[in-house]
Every structure is written in C-alpha cells, then in structure tokens.
Image: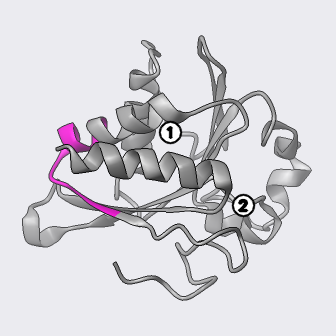
Amino acid sequence: MSKAAPNAPGAPPAGSGPASGGLTLPLAGLPDTERLAARLAAELEPGFIVFLSGDLGAGKTTFTRALLRALGYPGRVKSPTFALLESYDLSRFQLYHFDFYRLSSDRDWIDAGFDDLLGGSGVAVIEWPERAAASLPPPDLWLRLEFDAAHGDEARIARLDAATPRGLECLRKLRAASAGC
C-alpha cells in the first residue's frame, strides 16, 4: 500500500500515533462494504473515533449507514451534510455521525460544542475530518474510501490506518477477519 504524505488530504496527521502498517481492502460493491462495516461494528466501544475520508460519492455515508445497520439501528440514516451531526441511540452506546464538509474553519466544530461528544461514552464517525484536522484528536481508525473504476462503478478500495493503541488492536482484528475471506 502506498502511503500518502503526512498531512496530505486524506492522510493521518503526522505524529498522530503509532504506525499501524495499514490495511487495504478491495470492496467490489455494497455487500463487501456491509461486511467491512459489520466487522468494524463488532470492535467499536465507547470513546472510539473513526475518520472517514474520500471524494464526494465515494461511499462515506453508505459505509456509516451499513455500520449503523450492523449495530442494530433499524431507522432512517440521513447524511449530516447540512446539519453537521446526526445522533443515533444504540443499545451499546450513542453514535455521533459528523459531516464536516461545510465547515469554513477548522475550529467551527469546537465552536458548535461538538468537542464534548468525542472520546466520551459515545462513538464518533467523522466524515471530511480534513476540514478540521488541526483541532481534532487523533482517530482510533482512519478509513479512506477510493474509487476503483478498473473494477466497476460500485467498486471501491478501503484503506485503513490506526493512530491509537485501541485502533491498532481493531486493525489487527480486521486484518485477521479479512484473511479468512
């Protein structure tokens, strides 16, 4: 897997945590995305932070929808593009789904009081973290979704990196689960 330069769009921030070795997975379509989301759902615990990066239409909200389904959420899952935050009350924890695409400053999320929701008793999934990277804590897991046009319109490549010890453990389990496919 080729690594992006530190602090490049979609790259984990320099010095954000231990080197993870990364994990690259092909996602041929929605079933593969759902499978990856289900594997990640099994590893989530309160305080976990997931960054989701990728171009417009790469599948960030689709991945979050699959993650919520895997966590047992039966209701409608909306993109938080205009609201910036959608919150979901789950049996194990609260999941906060952020979308920072429309932020005009990397501190807007702090000014909105969202910093109180990170690292506590909930799980945070943050789309477009690059828009606030300078003021965000390091993620446990950073998932970058890329188009894979060589394999069809629905194909994606998922690149995962960990930036915390908890994220490294999650990445180790995801790697082991992926090897069994």
* Residue 98 visible in the shown view: yes
* Residue in the foreground of this view, choosing between 21 and 78: 21
- Which corner quadrant of the image does residue 88 belong to? top right
- Classed neighbour count for the residue bearing mark 2: other residues with Cα under 10 Å, few (<14), some (14–19), many (≥20): many
Residue 56: x %, y % from top left: 41, 62
Residue 63: x %, y % from top left: 39, 42
148 relative position to 102: left or right = left
Q: Which residues are magenta?
A: 24-34
- Secondary structure at badge 1 equals loop
Q: Which of the numbered marks, if any, corresponds to residue 109?
A: none
* Residue in the foreground of this view, choosing between 86 and 150: 150
* Residue in the foreground of this view, choosing between 118 and 105: 118
Say which residue label 1 marks: 79
Mark 2 residue type:
Pro
Please give the name of the residue rendered at 72% of the width and 61% of the height, measured from the top-left corner: 138
Point out the image quarter for the C terminus.
Answer: top left
* Residue 99 visible in the shown view: no
Q: Is residue 12 above or below residue 72?
A: below
138 relative position to 109: left or right = left
Point out the image quarter for the N terminus.
Answer: bottom left
136 relative position to 116: left or right = left
Please give the name of the residue rendered at 65% of the width and 69% of the height, measured from the top-left corner: 18
* Mark 1 / mark 2, whichever is N-terminal: 1
Q: Which of the numbered marks, if any, corresponds to residue 138?
A: 2
Residue 16: x %, y % from top left: 71, 70
Q: Are circles 1 and 2 on residues that touch, CB within 8 Å?
A: no
